[in-house]
């Protein structure tokens, strides 16, 4: 049982996906105990004045890769560093992708993940990545849903020979997940065609980072999204397209939704706010933006904004998968420089966990006129609902965990990697001036971030077993 301090947050403007009012919030035992126009501070109570600030639910990031390794590279942020960065950005719940080591069972992969997540600073859940669909694996999926609270799985349509499931296996995995009340998350890119384009480029001596983007064209994400939707429909399973980045994939999702299919989509700030001109950077700089899918031409971003506005894209996550640009001080194993000789050896991924809330407030609310409700929904409520965490997470309500963000909607500041808490040595958004800043963050009632001061501790993050996923 959590016996956190009794805390009162006074005079804040509480904004949820549906409500907007000024109130006091009383926190006891890590949960929200009361919300009312005026509450009286008792003796010994910690009081936080929030006049002029928004009080938002702690944000929920359902797409991260922390302390994640491949045979050649591993992400630089472990759970301690990554979740501390998350906290500074107002994210108090992370659902991380667990990749079982090669040849390991899903259960062994989960045990290994639990060891790695033990030093997390915010609450964490896991999605399980499925790499084969043998009988033993399908049986383990059932165990994971029923006993471990893992109600979503990820299937790759890209990276043949490493992570990819061919269509028959993908269909079987979706059918199993659907029958268990779990959500099928897919990385939608046509891996085999991309592999052929990559080989062709390398054979022609095209090794610079920009060829990463040129060998993963938008059409091949659209094709894979369409195929995933068809397979999910045939399997009778709800589907969640992760890091959707193209017009073609969005159109496929829109068509499916118009037909009433339970198809959902996530995008990321980098696909909304950057365009493929980032790959024209001098020398090896483009490697900072090597991720899959790649950053797309600007026309796609404009369509993604419309998709968000129309509600066809429900969530904004980060796909935080951080590597450093330089080799020191963390070492070559964490560095983009592993791919100096050829783009296909650049570790795929970028940091983002720390800036999602503030970027989306500035870009969605201030620049494009989306409502504060929609903003809260896309970064907190919708991901909590879709992934079986609501109403414990994702809203401000009596009985919910007291995960709260005090947010100054007017402060102007500039994104600098040098000020970040991620161990990555760069930001995709370096130098961008934003309006709106996280001031204080509470995790289950404990103030863990106070301005630039860290008040949390490693290991205080709890594991979150999740309920049924894939329901809006
Ligand atoms: Zn990812």
Image (cartoon, grey):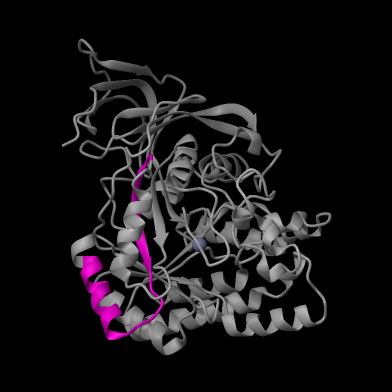
Q: Residue 251 versus residue 75: which sits nearer the camera?
A: 75
Above or below, 352 against 312 in this view is above
Q: Is residue 213 magenta?
A: no
Q: Quadrant of the N terminus?
A: top left
* Residue sitting at x 52%, y 74%: 188
* Residue sitting at x 36%, y 34%: 404
Q: Residue furthest left?
A: 1
- Residue 77 makes an appearance in the image: yes
Say whether residue 366 is left or right of residue 296: left
| Residue 394 position by quadrant | top left
Q: Is residue 132 magenta?
A: yes
Q: Residue 334 versus residue 267: which sits nearer the camera?
A: 334
The magenta segment is 121-145
Above or below, 323 against 1 in this view is below
- Whole-percent x, y for residue 6 in the image: 23, 22
- Whole-percent x, y for residue 365 in the image: 55, 42
Q: Residue furthest bottom?
A: 168
Q: Residue 203 versus residue 236: which sits nearer the camera?
A: 203
* Residue sitting at x 34%, y 85%: 172
Say whether residue 40 is left or right of residue 470: left
Above or below, 264 against 33 in this view is below
Say whether residue 183 is left or right of residue 313: left
């Amino acid at each position: 049982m959590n016996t956190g301090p009794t805390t009162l947050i006074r005079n804040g403007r509480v904004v949820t996906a549906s409500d907007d009012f000024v109130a006091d919030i009383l926190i006891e035992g890590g949960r929200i105990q009361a919300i009312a126009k005026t509450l009286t501070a008792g003796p010994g109570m910690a009081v936080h004045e929030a006049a002029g600030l928004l009080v938002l639910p702690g944000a929920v990031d359902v797409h991260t890769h922390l302390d994640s390794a491949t045979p050649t590279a591993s992400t630089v942020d472990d759970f301690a560093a990554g979740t501390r960065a998350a906290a500074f950005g107002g994210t108090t719940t992370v659902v991380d992708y667990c990749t079982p080591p090669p040849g390991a069972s899903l259960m062994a992969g989960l045990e290994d993940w639990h060891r790695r997540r033990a030093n997390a600073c915010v609450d964490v859940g896991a999605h399980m990545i499925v790499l084969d669909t043998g009988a033993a694996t399908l049986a383990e999926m059932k165990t994971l849903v029923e006993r471990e609270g893992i109600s979503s799985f990820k299937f790759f349509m890209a990276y043949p020979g490493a992570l990819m499931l061919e269509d028959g296996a993908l269909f079987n995995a979706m059918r199993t997940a659907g029958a268990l009340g779990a959500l099928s998350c897919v990385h939608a890119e046509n891996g085999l065609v991309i592999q052929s384009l990559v080989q062709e480029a390398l054979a022609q001596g095209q090794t610079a980072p920009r060829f990463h983007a040129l060998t993963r064209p938008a059409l091949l994400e659209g094709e894979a999204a369409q195929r995933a939707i068809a397979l999910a429909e045939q399997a009778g399973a709800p589907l969640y397209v992760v890091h959707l980045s193209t017009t073609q994939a969005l159109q496929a999702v829109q068509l499916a939704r118009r037909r009433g299919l339970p198809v959902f989509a996530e995008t990321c700030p980098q696909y909304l706010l950057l365009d493929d001109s980032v790959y024209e950077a001098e020398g090896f700089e483009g490697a900072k933006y090597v991720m899959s899918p790649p950053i797309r031409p600007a026309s796609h971003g404009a369509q993604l904004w419309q998709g968000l506005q129309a509600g066809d894209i429900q969530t904004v996550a980060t796909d935080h998968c951080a590597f450093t640009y330089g080799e020191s001080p963390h070492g070559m194993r964490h560095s983009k420089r592993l791919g100096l000789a050829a783009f296909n050896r650049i570790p795929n991924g970028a940091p983002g966990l720390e800036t999602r809330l503030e970027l989306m407030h500035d870009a969605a609310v201030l620049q494009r006129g989306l409502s504060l409700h929609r903003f809260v929904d896309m970064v907190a409520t919708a991901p909590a609902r879709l992934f079986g965490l609501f109403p414990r997470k994702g809203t401000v309500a009596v009985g919910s965990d007291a995960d709260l963000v005090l947010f100054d909607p007017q402060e102007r500041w500039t994104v600098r990697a040098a000020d970040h808490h991620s161990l990555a040595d760069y930001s995709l958004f370096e130098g961008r001036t934003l309006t709106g800043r996280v001031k204080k963050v509470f995790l289950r009632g404990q103030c863990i971030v106070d301005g630039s001061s860290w008040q949390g501790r490693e290991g205080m993050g709890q594991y979150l077993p999740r309920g049924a996923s894939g329901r809006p």
